[in-house]
Amino acid sequence: MKRLVSLFLFLFFIMPITLFAQEMNKRFSFKNFSRQSLKGVPTKGLNNTIIYGSCFYQEGSPNSDIFPAGMTGVIFKGCNLDNVIVPLGNTIIDSCHRQIDVQNDWDDWILDDITLQPMEPMNKAERIKAGLSIDPKDIPNTKWTEEQRRAFEDLINSISD
C-alpha cells in the first residue's frame, strides 16, 4: 500500500511540478534545425527547458552528435530527433528518435541503434502491399540505377493510390 501511495504522489504531484517548473524554450521550440549543428550554442539558455515541436533531423547522417557538451535537463516533446544523439540527462517525450538511412534500393530504412544495420523499410506497409521484400538481406549489394529507382517508385505509388 505504501508503494501505491508513493507512486500516486510521484505521478500526480512531483512529476507535474517538475515538468511545469521548466519553461518552454522559445528560441528552440517550433523550429526547423534539420541538418544543423547546435554544438556552439551556450547551454545556459538551453539546460532545464522544454523544447516543443522542433525538427532536428539529420538526413543521411545516423548518430549525429549535434548538441552542445554539458546539455542537461532538456525535455524534447513532439520533436523529430531522427539520426540525432540525445545526450544522457535529457528526456524524450512523444517524439520520433530513430536512426534512418537510404540503402542501395534508394529506400529509407530504419537502422539498428547500435550496429546501424538496416532493420526494416520506412514504407513497410506499402512494400508488403506491393508484394516486395521487407527483409534487409534482400537489399541489393550495389546501388540501383536511376531507371530501377523510378520503376520501384512507380510500383509503390501505384499501390498507394
Image: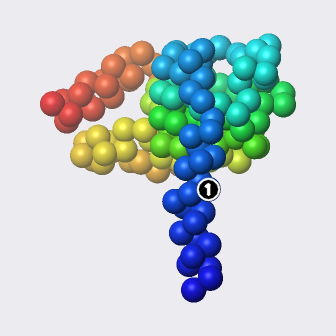
Q: Residue at 43% of width from left, 38% of height from top?
A: 122
Q: Residue furthest bottom?
A: 1
Quarter of the image with the N terminus in it: bottom right
In the orientation shown, which residue stands out farthest toward the right?
70
Q: Amino acid at mark 1?
A: Ile
Q: Is residue 14 left or right of residue 80?
A: right
Disc 1 crowd, CA 10 A, few/some/many (<14, 14-19, 20+): few
The colour scheme applied to this rendered structure is: rainbow
- Number of numbered callouts drawn: 1
Residue 97 visible (yes or no): no
Q: Residue at x 56, y 57 (%)?
A: 13
Viewer-side residue, 7 vs 131: 7
Q: Dividing the picture into quarters, in which one does residue 69 lie?
A: top right
Q: Quadrant of residue 118?
A: top right
> From the image, which quarter does the C terminus lie in?
top left
Return the x and y of residue 65 as percentages of the image width and height.
Answer: 75, 27
Depicted 4 relative to depicted 86: above or below: below
Q: Which SS class for mark 1?
A: helix
Q: Quadrant of residue 126?
A: top left
- Residue at x-position 76% and y-position 36%: 72
Q: Which residue bears the numbered disc 1?
A: 14
Q: Position of residue 150 (x, y in %)?
A: 33, 19
